[in-house]
């Protein structure tokens, strides 16, 4: 990994990152920040055209990006996508597991008209679990052998607030992310002593992305976190400053205070 500059920004030239679900939303925001800091980034999405368009839109920075098709629910697509990322980037240093489905795919009016769990279809439940939980497992399973071979690497699993995991009307999204956190803890335990870290990152509140219902008023939308809230913590997690850091659950909206508390008082 590379260094953190005196200005506090991450210098990530040479760092190779795979970000799943990065065609839009917080995935794209993280990918853009990484490219802006000099990283080489593989942007994945279910639709190749959207992934390539997103990657092309990140051109002009010190880093660079490629777009790859990957439905994280499909084992064969995951294996091919990871192999392609390793080939195109010359290896991988960091996996950011971000691809996910929100409640909007189950109930478009989930914020104003929550649907009880017994009205959720089996298909809708399975789609969210397959993406948000099984997808994280499949991509990490495909990436980890490359990291083990290198003797180092990092995994960042994107999750959400604990309160949302138990919120009324949030089946299956809440359970899928609760399971993701359990998976992350087990990943970290299994990888202890290998040189591969596992951390979790979450926005810290409702975020203005395509997962938000259209009917929200402008006043309510103005209260939502921007997708860019994920930029600073993901840059830090991919930087030399985070070397050896594992098992953390970082809330992006509280990152500045968390980092200050971690680093302690400045030396005179």
Image (tube, rainbow, N blue to C red):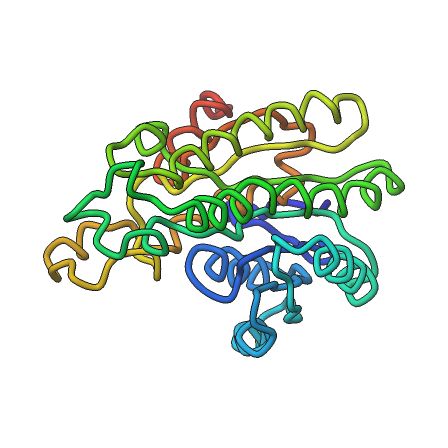
Q: Quadrant of residue 193?
A: top right
Quarter of the figure with residue 81: bottom right
Q: Is residue 78 left or right of residue 227?
A: right
- Pick the residue in front: 108 or 251: 108
Residue at (63, 43) in percent of width and height: 239
- Residue 134 percent coordinates (x, y): 60, 42
In percent of width and height, residue 71 lies at 61, 60
Residue 205 lies, in percent from the top left, at 30, 41
Rendering coords of residue 93 (x, y %): 74, 48
Residue 168 to residue 75: above or below: above
Q: Looking at this view, is 38 or 96 the one in front? A: 96
Quick check: 124 above or below 190?
Answer: below
Q: Is residue 94 left or right of residue 180?
A: right
The residue located at (84%, 37%) in the rendering is: 148
Quadrant for the N terminus, please.
top right
Q: Residue at x 29, y 49 (%)?
A: 225
Relative to 179, 38 lies left or right: right
**Quadrant housing residue 19:** bottom right
Q: Nearer the viewer, residue 170 or 148?
A: 170
Foreground residue among 179 and 96: 179
Total number of numbered discs in the rendering? 0
Q: Residue at x 58, y 49 (%)?
A: 10
Image check: 77 left or right of 203?
right
């Amino acid at each position: 990994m590379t260094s953190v500059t005196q200005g506090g920004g991450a210098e990530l030239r040479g760092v190779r990152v795979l970000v799943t679900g990065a065609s839009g939303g917080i995935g794209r925001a993280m990918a853009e920040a990484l490219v802006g800091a000099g990283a080489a980034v593989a942007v994945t999405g279910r639709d190749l055209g959207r992934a390539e368009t997103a990657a092309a839109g990140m051109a002009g920075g010190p880093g660079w990006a490629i777009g790859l098709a990957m439905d994280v629910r499909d084992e064969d697509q995951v294996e091919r996508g990871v192999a392609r990322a390793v080939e195109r980037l010359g290896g991988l240093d960091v996996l950011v597991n971000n691809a996910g489905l929100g409640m909007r795919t189950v109930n478009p009016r989930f914020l104003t008209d929550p649907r009880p769990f017994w009205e959720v279809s089996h298909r809708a439940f399975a789609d969210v679990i397959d993406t948000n939980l099984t997808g994280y497992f499949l991509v990490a399973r495909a990436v980890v052998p490359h990291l083990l071979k290198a003797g180092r690497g990092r995994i960042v699993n994107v999750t959400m607030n604990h309160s949302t995991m138990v919120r009324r009307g949030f089946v299956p999204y809440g359970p899928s992310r609760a399971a993701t956190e359990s998976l992350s803890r087990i990943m970290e335990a299994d990888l202890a002593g290998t040189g591969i870290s596992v951390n979790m990152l979450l926005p810290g509140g409702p975020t203005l992305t395509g997962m938000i219902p259209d009917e929200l008023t402008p006043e309510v939308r103005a209260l939502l976190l921007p997708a860019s809230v994920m930029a600073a913590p993901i840059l830090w997690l991919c930087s030399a400053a985070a070397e050896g850091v594992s098992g953390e659950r970082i809330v992006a909206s509280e990152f500045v205070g968390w980092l200050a508390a971690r680093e302690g008082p400045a030396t005179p």
